[in-house]
Image: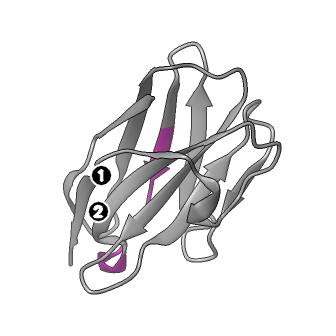
Amino acid sequence: QVQLVESGGGLVQAGGSLRLSCAASGRTFSRYTMGWFRQAPGKEREFVAAISWSGGNTYYADSVKGRFTISRDNAKNTVYLQMNSVKPEDTAVYYCGYGVGRAYVPSNGREYDYWGQGTQVTVSS
């Protein structure tokens, strides 16, 4: 089993910045994609960003493109989400996902095998 722990969430004013982290532990795999998803109250979970094992491929939802940056440190088994110019509509619980053996960067949550418990991000206007 892979355990994922997100951190870095909190309350931030619109226009501000926040950096989320997701650390993986437990069973290790040689190749895995990592992604960020979010779920706002009353809405379905939606894709935010994903990054390939090498970090060479990234993919973003249109709603965050140009504002959020996903990165990873494989030595620390950690993925990051730098959130800049945040908006009230970014308010949600943010989850990281871990996709074993993926050679691409999926935006479909069903392509991820493990999930963290989530971290709350609240953007005030």
Residue 85, compared with residue 22, is above or below; it is: below
How far apart are labels 1 and 2 at the CA level? 6 Å
Residue 86 visible in the shown view:
no
Type of residue at label 1?
Gly
Asked if residue 10 lies left or right of residue 54, the reply is left
Type of residue at label 2?
Val
Query: Which residue corresponds to mark 1?
Result: 118
Specify start and end residues of the magenta stretch as a single range.
Answer: 80-89
Residue 99: horizontal and vertical position, in percent?
62, 44
Q: Residue at x 50, y 16 (%)?
A: 76
Asked if residue 7 lies left or right of residue 52, the reply is left
* Label 2: element kind: strand
Whether the residues at callouts 1 and 2 have beta carbons within 8 Å, the answer is: yes
Q: Nearer the viewer, residue 63 or 78?
A: 78
| Residue 124 location, quadrant | bottom left
Q: Residues within 10 Å of mark 2 (few under 14, many from 20)?
A: some
86 in magenta: yes
User: What colour scheme was applied to this rendering of the protein?
Assistant: one colour
Figure label count: 2
Q: Residue at x 59, y 31 (%)?
A: 72
Quarter occupied by the N terminus = top left
Going by the picture, which residue comes out furthest to the front?
1
Residue 122: horizontal and vertical position, in percent?
21, 65
Residue 43: horizontal and vertical position, in percent?
34, 84
Q: Nearer the viewer, residue 60 or 30?
A: 30
* Label 1: element kind: loop
Asked if residue 20 lies left or right of residue 58, the reply is left
Q: Nearer the viewer, residue 60 or 103?
A: 103
Query: Which residue corresponds to mark 2?
Result: 93
